[in-house]
Image (cartoon, helix red, strand yellow):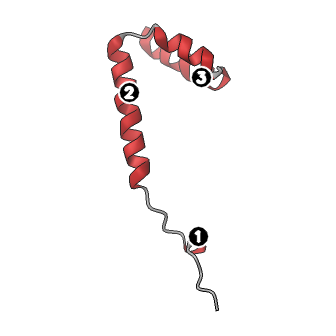
């Protein structure tokens, strides 16, 4: 239960922290948690690279 409460407070605080404050906080995370965050970042990056946009209005129209 304590871990769930910590995650909830992290989610609430996260948008309010600057990049420097986030880095200072992340320094003290356990190594396993750092590894999990890193692999999550890699998966997200891979997913975004594979994303394809299928909207008609974004396709270039041929010029006459």
Mark 3 and mark 2: Cα distance apart in space = 17 Å
Q: Name the residue under label 1.
A: 58
Please tell me which of labels 1 and 3 falls first in the chain.
Answer: 3
Mark 2 and mark 1: Cα distance apart in space = 33 Å
Q: Which mark is residue 14?
A: 3
Q: Nearer the viewer, mark 3 or mark 2?
A: 2
Q: Which residue is drawn at 38% across and 27% down?
A: 38
Residue at disc 1, secondary structure:
helix
Q: Which residue is drawn at 53% across and 11% down?
A: 25
Q: Position of residue 33 (x, y in %)?
A: 37, 17
Please tell me which of labels 3 and 2 falls first in the chain.
Answer: 3
Q: Position of residue 57 (x, y in %)?
A: 60, 73
Q: In this view, does 14 lie above or below 43?
A: above
Q: Name the residue under label 2.
A: 38
Quarter occupied by residue 1? top left
- Asked if residue 36 lies left or right of residue 64, the reply is left
Q: Which residue is drawn at 57% across and 18% down?
A: 22
Q: Which residue is drawn at 61% across and 15% down?
A: 21
Residue at disc 2, secondary structure:
helix
Q: Which quadrant is the C terminus positioned in?
A: bottom right
Q: Position of residue 47 (x, y in %)?
A: 39, 47
Q: Which residue lies furthest to the bottom in this view?
A: 64
Q: Is residue 1 visible?
A: no
Q: Is residue 56 above or below residue 12?
A: below
Please tell me which of labels 2 and 1 falls first in the chain.
Answer: 2
Q: Is residue 6 visible?
A: yes
Say few, some or many: other residues with alpha carbon within 10 Å of mark 2 (under 14 / 14 to 19 / 20 or more). few
Residue at disc 3, secondary structure:
helix
């Amino acid at each position: 239960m304590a871990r769930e409460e910590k995650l909830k407070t992290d989610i609430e605080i996260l948008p309010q922290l600057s990049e420097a404050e986030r880095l200072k906080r992340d320094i003290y995370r356990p190594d396993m948690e750092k590894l999990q965050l890193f692999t999550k970042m890699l998966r997200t990056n891979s997913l975004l690279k594979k994303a394809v946009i299928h909207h008609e209005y974004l396709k270039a129209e041929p010029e006459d």
